[in-house]
Image: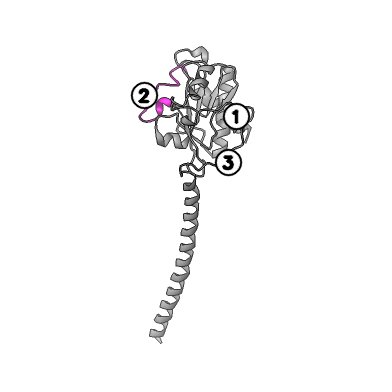
Amino acid sequence: MGARKKDGDRRIGRRALLVGGLGAAVGTAALARDELARLWWRVPGVEKPRVAGAVDFTGAQWVAASDGNYRGADRPDDYGIDMVIVHVTQGDFASAVKVFQDPSHKAATHYIVRQDGRITQMIRELDVAYHAGNRSYNERSIGIEHEGFVDRPQDFTDAMYAASARLTAGICRRYGIPVDRAHIIGHVEVPGTDHTDPGKHWDWDRYMKLVREAHTASA
C-alpha cells in the first residue's frame, strides 16, 4: 500500500514535470520569436517602412538628416527608449541643419528646438541618432538640440523652454520614461563624452518643472 502510494506520487510528479516542461518550451519559443522580431531590424539593409515627412511630435516640421548620421531601427521593439538627452547647437538653426544633412559629420539629433519655440524633427524616434557619443546611450535615448550657445544665457528663451518641455513630456509619455533627472540628462552627463552642453546657464530646475507640468496636463 505504501509502495503504491509512493509510485503514484512519482507518476503525478512526472506528469506535472511533463506539463511544466511543455509550458516552458512554449514560453521559450514565444520569447525566441519576440527576440527574432527585434533582431530582424538590426540586420543590415532591413528597414521598417516609413511614411515620407511623418513626424512623432505634432506640430514639428520635418527636415531630414543625412542617413549617414543615424542608423535605421525599430525602436522601442529592438532597443528600449528610457532617456532624453539635452544638447545645445553651438550655432544657429541653419548651421545645425547644414551639419546634420552632411553625411561626413557622423552626428545628428532627432529634434532641434529654435529660440522662437519652433520644433524641427530630423530623425524619426524609432531610429538611432548618433548624438550622444556613446553607442549604448544613442540606442536608448532621444536627442534634442537647442539653438544657441552654452555661454549665452539669453539664447535660452521662454519660448524655447516651453516648447522643449512639451516635446520632452510627450516623449516620456510615449515610452513610459520617468520625468526625473536620472532619465532627462544633459550631453555633458553621458559617460565618455567631451561635450559640456547644455552648460551652466541651462536652468534645469525651471526646465524640469515645465516638463512635469506638461506631462501632468496631458495625462
Along the line of sight, the residue nearer the viewer: 190 or 212: 190
Label count reads 3
Judging by the rendered image, the residue that carries numbered circle 1 is 214
Q: Position of residue 31 (x, y in %)?
A: 48, 55
Q: Position of residue 105 (x, y in %)?
A: 44, 24
Judging by the rendered image, the residue that carries numbered circle 3 is 49
C-alpha separation, residue under disc 1 versus residue under disc 2: 31 Å
Judging by the rendered image, the residue that carries numbered circle 2 is 194
Residue 175 visible in the shown view: yes
Q: Main secondary structure of the magenta part?
A: loop
In this picture, is 10 found above or below 134? below
Crowd band around label 3 with a 10 angstrom C-alpha radius: few (<14), some (14–19), many (20+): few
Q: Which numbered disc, 3 or 1, marks the residue that appears first in the sequence?
A: 3
Q: Which mark lies nearer to you, 2 or 3?
A: 3
Quadrant where the image shows the C terminus: top right
Q: Amino acid at mark 3?
A: Pro
Q: Is residue 138 magenta?
A: no
Farthest-out residue, bottom: 1
Tell me where the magenta segment starts and ends, as one range.
187-201
Q: Which mark lies nearer to you, 1 or 2?
A: 2
Q: Quadrant of residue 131?
A: top left
Q: Position of residue 210 (x, y in %)?
A: 56, 25
Crowd band around label 1 with a 10 angstrom C-alpha radius: few (<14), some (14–19), many (20+): some
Residue found at x 63% / y 30%: 58
In this picture, is 201 found above or below 37? above
Q: Amino acid at mark 1?
A: Ala
